[in-house]
Amino acid sequence: MSDEREPTNGAGDPASATGDSAFAPEERELRRHSETGVVTGVCAGLGEYTRVDPVVWRVAFSLTALSSLVGVLLYIMAWMVMRDQQGGPAMAEQLLNRRISARAVPALLGAGLAVATALSLIGGFGWGTLVLATPLILGVLVAHNRGVDLRHAYRELPSLLRSGGPPPTAPAPAPTPAYYNPAQPWAQAPSGPIDLAVIAGPTPEAGEHSGEHPHEPGESDDGDEGGPSTWASDAREGRREARQRRREARERRRAARRNRGVRLCTLVFWALLVATGLALMRTGGSPLSALVGPETGPVYLGSVVVIIGLALILGAWVGDPRGLMALGLVGTLLLVAVSTVDVTAMRFGTAEWRPRTVAEAEEPYGLTLGGASLDLTRLDLEPGQRVEVSATVAAGALDVEVPDTARVDVHAASKLGRISVDNTQRAGTRLDVRTTLEPKAAEARATDGKEASGEPPTVVLNLASYVADMEVGRATP
């Protein structure tokens, strides 16, 4: 009996027919899936080739597009180097008159993202660098965790791009079968192939009518166990057992990586707990301002992101770091939010502002989300006195009551919503209302023919919002 052996890899282990690496071998083609894709099928094709959900690719392109449209440029580059769904030559292959290997496409995307990240560091580390570096680091970690030799992939990239092979030719369209009915002899047979299945019945299997059992070549009638059919059965059984052994070995390795990943997550938890304790002890203020305040929040959250990043890099070699990716994403988003806005200054709910002195009225009033009311009727104003009042509601509603004994200069601006001042109302987008409300007492005296005694006080009212309904009305103090 001949000894059939399975192909082995460089380490001597049997090689799987499909492989477990993230990027497929050379014989697999990288094509765009225009039918299942959203725009051009680039993300769907990359998802099938790398065995990564296409949604992840779409999120990566969309996220990097926020930084100087880098994601858009990378998407266009991927579209140019990927073949269509029928396997026709890519746009870059036609322009360069050479064949581009499928392995070069993910490597080119990674190299382009790395170059864009490096260029964003010229002006200093900022939002754009963070947006580009996050998918780059996650992609490198996932590729290494999938068993991709990144050093070898980029070492062979120049040779793949210098390949002088001709591009693949577009596949010829399959001929459309023409149907001919022989029952109508007067009908002329059309040109092209004729599908005889419309008139022919099912073909009987071999030995169906003869009642004989078909034999394979070399098999004897007396069931000789040494025939070629027996050898093939033994070979199939051996391959099945080898696949089962490989499957069990993979399960054992995955279980070991999960156990090491749990220990790694425990270590990260204690490290984050120590960093939180140090931040609270050093500031001595409220826990919210110490952790997410504008002064100490970026330092604390930056240390959290660094700890998680080091754990992800370490987990790519010693354990399963997938549980830390979501935590790292949340920490990164919090770091960006704390670095750009004052999180501790955000206010939600309802607010009632009733200043009684000029000093209280001139303090800025703000609400992030909710409804607010500003009552200025209790202000003790002197004739000719000028007071500036500022109020901001990012999203919600704002009602302002002004005294009828003062002149009120209103400046209200809103990105979207409605602004109502006395009897005037405007609604829409990019609203900017500037008007002046004269004191009713002076109007009444002018109507009666009496002269006003002294200059009335003036209230300068500055209102701002993004999406809100603002209303300014008079009320008797």
Image: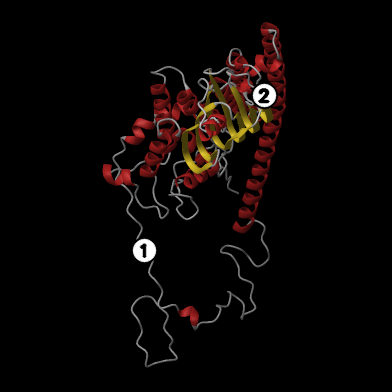
Whole-angstrom CA distance, mark 1 to mark 2, is 79 Å
Residue 473's place in the image compared with 219, above or below, is above
- Report how many numbered discs are placed on residues in the image: 2
Q: Nearer the viewer, residue 343 or 218?
A: 343
Q: Residue at x 63, y 65 (%)?
A: 220
The reply to whether residue 193 is in sight is: yes
**Residue that mark 2 sits on:** 354
Q: In which quadrant is the C terminus drawn?
A: top right
Disc on the earlier residue, 1 or 2: 1
Relative image position of residue 447 (x, y in whole percent): 52, 35
Relative image position of residue 354 (x, y in whole percent): 67, 24
Q: Residue at x 47, y 55 (%)?
A: 35
Q: What amino acid is labelled 1 in the image?
A: Pro
Question: At numbered mark 1, what does the secondary structure look like: helix, strand or loop?
Answer: loop
Q: Residues within 10 Å of mark 2 (few under 14, many from 20)?
A: some
Quadrant of res 277: top right
Identify the disc placed on residue 173: 1
Quadrant of res 419: top right
Q: Nearer the viewer, residue 248 or 153?
A: 153
Relative image position of residue 41 (x, y in whole percent): 45, 49
Quadrant of res 225: bottom right
Identify the disc placed on residue 397: none
Q: Nearer the viewer, residue 274 or 463?
A: 463
